Amino acid sequence: MLRRALASVVVGSMSDRWPTVAWKLLDQRLVIPGTVHFKWDEAKHQFASVYYEIDMLAPLTKVLGNLEDVCMVLNSPSGILA
């Protein structure tokens, strides 16, 4: 999937950096910590809402080594990590 997604990405002067970023991401497993909060409605005896939050920044920074590459991946028009 990553190979196909990166094949069509051209973002001005950043396009020459994509192959390096792609190689860093290939065959990597990202462990993304997160939390889920459930709000209970006492009157209706059911869940009223669910809220989740994940931290993709730390795992991607660990793999890629710098925030500039992390920002490039997260802002990718191809939705690489979506």
Image: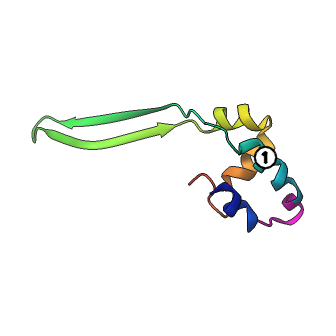
Q: Is residue 19 above or below residue 39?
A: below
- Residue ID at (79%, 34%): 65
Number of residues whose C-alpha sits closer than 10 Å to that of mark 1, classed few (under 14), some (14–19) or many (20 or more): few
Say which element carries label 1: helix
Magenta span contains residue 52: no
Q: Is residue 81 above or below residue 37?
A: below
Q: Which residue is mark 1?
A: 23
**Residue 32: percent from left, percent from top:** 55, 34
- Residue ID at (60%, 36%): 30
Q: Which quadrant would residue 63 be assigned to in this image?
A: top right
Which residue is more in the foreground, 45 or 81? Answer: 81
Left or right for 52, reference 68: left
**Residue 71: percent from left, percent from top:** 73, 48
- Residue ID at (67%, 55%): 2
Which residue is more in the foreground, 71 or 19? Answer: 19
- The boundaries of the magenta stretch are 9-15
Which residue is more in the foreground, 72 or 18? Answer: 18
Placement of the C terminus among the 4 image quadrants: bottom right
